[in-house]
Amino acid sequence: MAVAMVKKEPRAQCGAGTPDAKVEGSGNSFRATRGSTQAYSGSDYRAAIQAALDAISSGQRVAVLASGSIGAGTITIASGKTFEGCGTINVGNRSGRGAIEVTDASDVKIPFLTMTGNPYFGLRLSGCRNLSLGNITMNLSGGLGIRFDRDRAPSSNVSMDVISVTGAGSHAVETWNINGLSINQVIARNVGESGLLLQKTTNARVGLVDGNNVATGTGYATLRFANQNGEINGGYNTNVYIQKVVSRGGGRGIFCVSRSGAVTIDNIDLASNGNNAILIENCYNVNIKSGTINGGGEVRLSARSEFPNNKDITLTLTVNNNSVRESPCGENTTFNIAGNARKQIC
């Protein structure tokens, strides 16, 4: 089944046309205006942004044209509002909180955002319905890029266009509790943990996950499925579709663990991963349909005793300068392995 890409609106420039509110200025002087009405004037960049957001109504748009720093503060976006970050928003670290948060809200759009700094979470999201993230660029010096909370309300009908994250100390994108997720691309560079981590996420379609130097020295991966990802009502009929995974160096390439699965990956291109190129552990209905692995850590199917063993795993790959090992033997495992890989399979 082909992966449906994110339905894109025609490309526009950030701040194009006539935004309902704007944030302008630089240095220590910022102003927020809604039409001809001034909503804020002063030295606090975060306050200017929040004032502009608070001044508009559902269905309206804010364009942040100025660059600046919000410090260890939080910007909150309410239902129906469109937020365009046209300048560069530098952020600090507020423990347990996001630099930008959308919670229990519907129809929020963030078509453009450029963020720098070391946030606890760059974007913190939960209880979102019909959330649209567009071109999001995070050039970070630590922290976690985009996080959907584990212990708050679930989200539905979430779309992302191109998410580019460099320098995060944790994950680039981490999801929990989403039903209906569409991502065009996740590009992760020099990220400490996962590039894309999907957890308790169902009916997901992803175009490309591309990681370089992701998860070095950790058990994470460029693409990781965990915590019953893909499981629906106790079953694992395919509902997670990934078009392509590219991984270079770092830690693992692809990791499926803790009763996850229900996934088809059309094509992979993995090389020189510092940990397992692929690790599948206690997963069900995983089908990797094509691709290549060159070097790196072994391709491994394994299982922990506390969960049911692997079941319905199919790997159709060319593997060179590496090994493929299955231990213990899973149920209904199919290997179609070309290349010079050493094989120790059931």
Image (cartoon, helix red, strand yellow):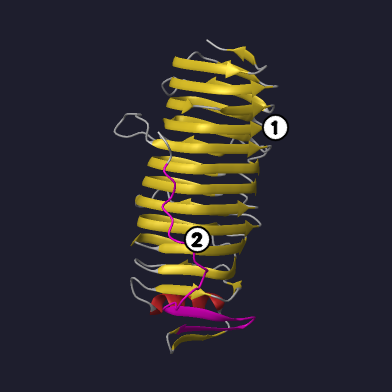
Residue pointed to by mark 1: 272
Residue 20 lies in the magenta-colored region: yes
What's under tag 1, amino acid-wise? Ser
Q: Is residue 221 visible?
A: no
Q: Residue furthest top?
A: 346
Q: Main secondary structure of the magenta part?
A: loop
Q: Quadrant of residue 213?
A: top right
Up the image or down, 272 lies above or below 337; here it is: below
Residue at image coords 53%, 64%: 113
What's under tag 2, amino acid-wise? Gly
Residue pointed to by mark 2: 98
Q: Quadrant of residue 273?
A: top right
Q: Position of residue 257 (x, y in %)?
A: 49, 30
Seen in the image, is 69 located left or right of residue 230? right
Residue 56 lies in the magenta-colored region: no
Residue at image coords 46%, 63%: 110
